[in-house]
Image: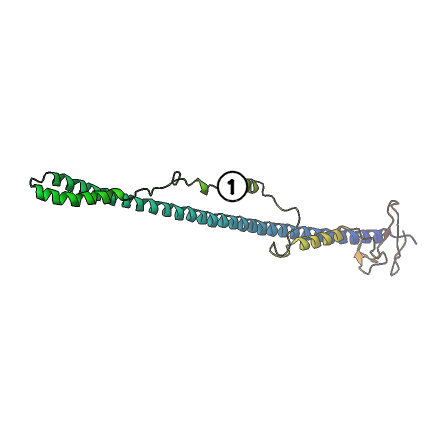
Amino acid sequence: MPVSPQSELSDGIAMLVAGNDRIQAIITQMEEICRTIEENGRRQKQHLGLRFDSLYSILEERKKELLQSIAREQEEKVQRVRGLIRQYGDHLEASSKLVETAIQAMEEPQMAVYLQHSKELLKKITDMSKVSMSSRPEPGYENMDHFSINVDYVAEMLRTIEFQTEPLGEEEGDGPMEGSEAAADEDRLDSLEAPEAAEDVGPRQKPASSPHGETLPGTKASVEQGTGTSCGVLWGGGGTS
């Protein structure tokens, strides 16, 4: 049975409305995807910042430990050398006083007193000369080059930091990210964009009004792709063209 122009127009309107609804759903879905992308971007920026802050903290802690090691050995070496300086200084002071005493003894006019003091002074001079002053820092004792470090390979690693090509596991990341949600969003978007191949092409129960003021049957034409022809079933006594 031929389909009336009113029925075809009603079906066309219904198809446009359905298409508009589908487009609006797609727009809404894509807006949600945009919001998800922005949220994921903010989260990853924050996560990246925390990772670098952790690196800074590790470097600062290690720097502190190495500086403390240098400071400890520096203090030990300085204290040892200062101890030797005090030892040599005490010996020098005692030796200088002994020299002064010996000079004064040589000026003694009385021979008996001179002989008595000279024996005592000779013993002190002998004892003073026997004191060993061989304790000195070994050559290169002041060298601190053994505290040098090589950070070239570490610097190269830092310069070549890149994002991982494989997704992080739950133990490395912050748990499952929104990747699954984004994939689900894409699946829903694909389902909205897919043609309504399985849609029922039978009659629709939604009446439409024609420009002439008469109520038209709410039939939907089954459009044959590539032919431009349509056919349908009229309900409620629709007329023929």
Front one among 185 and 107: 107
Q: Quadrant of residue 145?
A: top left
Residue 131, horizontal then vertical, whole percent:
27, 44
- Which residue appears farthest toward the right when viewing the image? 1
Q: Position of residue 59 (x, y in %)?
A: 49, 47
Q: Is residue 179 visible?
A: yes
Amino acid type, label 1: Val
The residue furthest left is 110
Q: Position of residue 34 (x, y in %)?
A: 64, 50
Name which residue lies at 52% across and 51% down.
54
Query: Secondary structure beneath disc 1?
Result: loop
Does residue 93 appear anywhere in the picture? no
Instruction: Quadrant for the N terminus, please.
Output: bottom right
Total marks drawn? 1
Q: Quadrant of residue 220?
A: bottom right
Is 15 in front, or is 30? Answer: 30
Q: Residue at the spot x=73%, y=54% of the render?
A: 188
- Residue found at x 58% / y 52%: 43
- Residue 214 horizontal side relative to residue 79, left or right: right
In this image, 61 relative to 178: left or right? Answer: left
Q: What residue would you read off at disc 1? A: 151
